[in-house]
Amino acid sequence: MREQQFPRARQDCLSREFGDEVLVYDLQRNVGHCLNSTAAATWRLCDGNNNSSQIAGTLSRQLSVQVDESIVQLALDQLGDAHLLVEREAPTEHPSRRVAIRRMGIAAAIALPLVTSIIAPTPAQAASCLHNLQACTSNAQCCSGLCAPAVHTCVGG
């Protein structure tokens, strides 16, 4: 129950700040997440000691704009869906991004949190292709797409 009321960021992820945004890499799932300024600021405040109301107040002061608690809940839901928070016991229903925009007005949409995720490739997927005259066993390995079967060498690349 404590995690649900006082969200806590996972400490086993790598993070790097780029201006107001943060790139977070989940080592357990091999997934990278880009947090926009609102999501990043929310994530930084998830220390297990602040509830969503306190986070909204702190964000309002930091961003010099009124941040509604529903925006914080939206950020927490996105961070939770990305597995960047210590798991909550029971998910709660909060307004969708669309409902939040309607409530706040389109001008405030800039403050909406956004978490964008990308899955890291496996080592085999990340490997480069083989160039001309390198040893191969299939066409898929060669940059040219041609592996000469008689000599097992990439050709035409």
Image (cartoon, grey):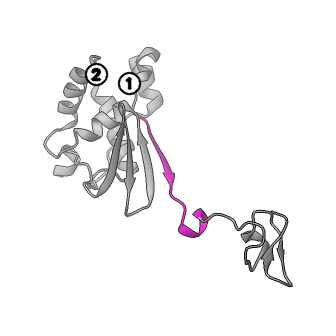
Q: Which of 46 and 12 is in front in this view?
A: 12
Amino acid at the residue labelled 2? Leu
**Tag nearer the camera, 2 or 1:** 2
Amino acid at the residue labelled 1? Ala
Q: Residue at x 28, y 36 (%)?
A: 42
Q: Nearer the viewer, residue 134 or 122?
A: 134
Cα distance between the residues tagged 2 and 1:
9 Å
Q: Name the residue under label 1.
A: 111
Judge from the rendering whether residue 70 lies leftward or rightward of residue 156; answer left or right: left
Q: Is residue 15 shown in magenta?
A: no
Q: Nearer the viewer, residue 154 or 51?
A: 154
Above or below, 111 relative to 127: above
Q: Is residue 62 visible?
A: yes
Please report contact status of discs 2 and 1: CB closer than 8 Å, yes or no. yes
Residue 146 locus on image (x, y percent): 83, 69
Q: Can residue 93 be seen in this view?
A: no
Q: Name the residue under label 2.
A: 63
Residue 124 locus on image (x, y percent): 59, 70
Residue 47 locus on image (x, y percent): 18, 45
Q: Report the magenta residues as a range.
A: 114-126
The C terminus lies in quadrant: bottom right
Label 2's element? helix
